[in-house]
Image: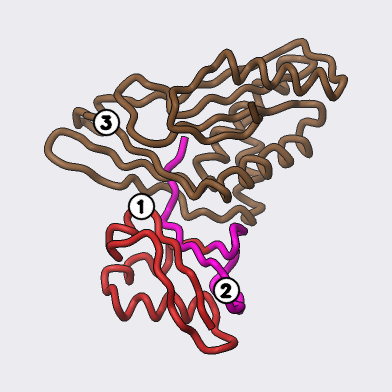
Chain colours: A brown, B red
């Protein structure tokens, strides 16, 4: 199973953690800390009862962007390892849409890199959620995706270290 | 030259298909392709300032000059995670 992956199957956090541990071990990195993050479908959202979400992605570009985020992490926190799985298709309330695992020798780096990763995914990964709520549905539109925006990247790094 | 266009999320809903092809003159840019689609699908206009573009699965910009056979994806603001 690959470190960067988009799937319509339910997310398995244990598997993501296993992958990150295995990869760190192959690279002979010393691991003393793992951070795991799950994003889950929320209801109510903005005062409305959510029925379900439908995620779609431009998959080949999304995988490249996950790899780019991994390279960015390597620059900021050398020695940190990342694995990231994103769910696609129909998700019910409470289901996980994204799993992120970061590992490092000491805890500060894996905490920061994990936070950085979820923020960067929301900024630049070509993935969209279609929210179906009571009384209607809407494509959620967040950030204009600009992976080359250095200022945003730097601000995200600063925020992740707080 | 023949260009394949991929559309996602709300942009796909507006255009009514996730993939189409268009003929463009040599030297055409992403912007020219976007403008061409704009003429056909007026609702795209409101995405003028917030659309991103990728060519052959790499993020690009509106001024990039296209080559015959390129695959261009227009991306509305993203909402993953």
Q: Give x and y (percent) for residue B57.
A: 59, 57
Q: Residue at x 73, y 26 (%)?
A: A81
- In whole angstroms, how far apart are the C-alphas of marks 3 and 1? 16 Å
The answer to whether the residue labelled 3 contacts the one labelled 1, judged by CB atoms less than 8 Å apart, is: no
Specify whether disc 3 shares its chain with disc 2. no
In which chain is the residue bearing label 1? B
Q: Which mark is residue B9?
A: 1
Number of residues whose C-alpha sits closer than 10 Å to that of mark 3, classed few (under 14), some (14–19) or many (20 or more): many
The answer to whether B61 appears left or right of A3 in the picture is: left
Where is A26 relative to B50, above or below?
above
Number of residues whose C-alpha sits closer than 10 Å to that of mark 2, classed few (under 14), some (14–19) or many (20 or more): few
Residue nearest the observer in this picture, A114 or A125: A125
As drawn, which residue projects farthest toward the right? Answer: A28
Q: Quadrant of the N terminus of chain A?
A: top right
Specify whether disc 3 shares its chain with disc 1. no
Q: Residue at x 46, y 83 (%)?
A: B23
Residue nearest the observer in this picture, A159 or A90: A90
Find the magenta span and give its range: B54-81
- Foreground: disc 1 or disc 2: 2
For label 3, the SS is strand
Q: Which residue is mark 3?
A: A52
For label 2, the SS is loop
Q: Which residue is mark 2?
A: B69
Q: Residue at x 87, y 20 (%)?
A: A28
In which chain is the residue bearing label 2? B
The picture quadrant where one finds residue A31 is top right
The picture quadrant where one finds residue A92 is top left
- In whole angstroms, how far apart are the C-alphas of marks 1 and 2? 23 Å
- In whole angstroms, how far apart are the C-alphas of marks 3 and 2? 38 Å
Q: Residue at x 30, y 23 (%)?
A: A93
């Amino acid at each position: 199973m690959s470190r960067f992956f988009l799937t319509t199957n339910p997310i398995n956090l244990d598997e993501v953690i296993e992958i990150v541990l295995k990869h760190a071990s192959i690279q002979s990195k010393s691991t003393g800390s793992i951070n795991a993050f799950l994003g889950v479908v929320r209801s109510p959202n903005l005062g409305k009862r959510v029925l379900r979400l439908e995620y779609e992605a431009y998959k080949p570009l999304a995988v490249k962007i996950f790899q780019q985020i991994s390279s960015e992490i390597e620059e900021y926190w050398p020695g940190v390892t990342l694995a990231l799985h994103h769910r696609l298709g129909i998700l019910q309330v409470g289901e996980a849409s994204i799993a992120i695992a970061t590992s490092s020798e000491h805890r500060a780096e894996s905490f920061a890199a994990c936070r950085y990763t979820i923020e960067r995914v929301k900024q630049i990964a070509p993935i969209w959620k279609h929210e179906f709520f009571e009384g209607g549905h809407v494509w959620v539109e967040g950030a204009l995706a600009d992976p080359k925006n250095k200022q945003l990247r730097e601000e995200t790094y600063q925020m992740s270290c707080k | 030259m023949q260009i394949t266009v991929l559309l996602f999320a709300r942009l796909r809903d507006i255009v009514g298909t996730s993939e189409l092809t268009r003929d463009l003159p040599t030297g055409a840019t992403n912007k020219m392709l976007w403008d061409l689609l704009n003429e056909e699908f007026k609702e795209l206009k409101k995405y003028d300032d917030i659309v991103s573009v990728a060519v052959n699965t790499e993020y690009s910009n509106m001024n990039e000059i296209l080559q015959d056979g390129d695959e261009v994806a227009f991306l509305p603001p993203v909402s993953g995670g």
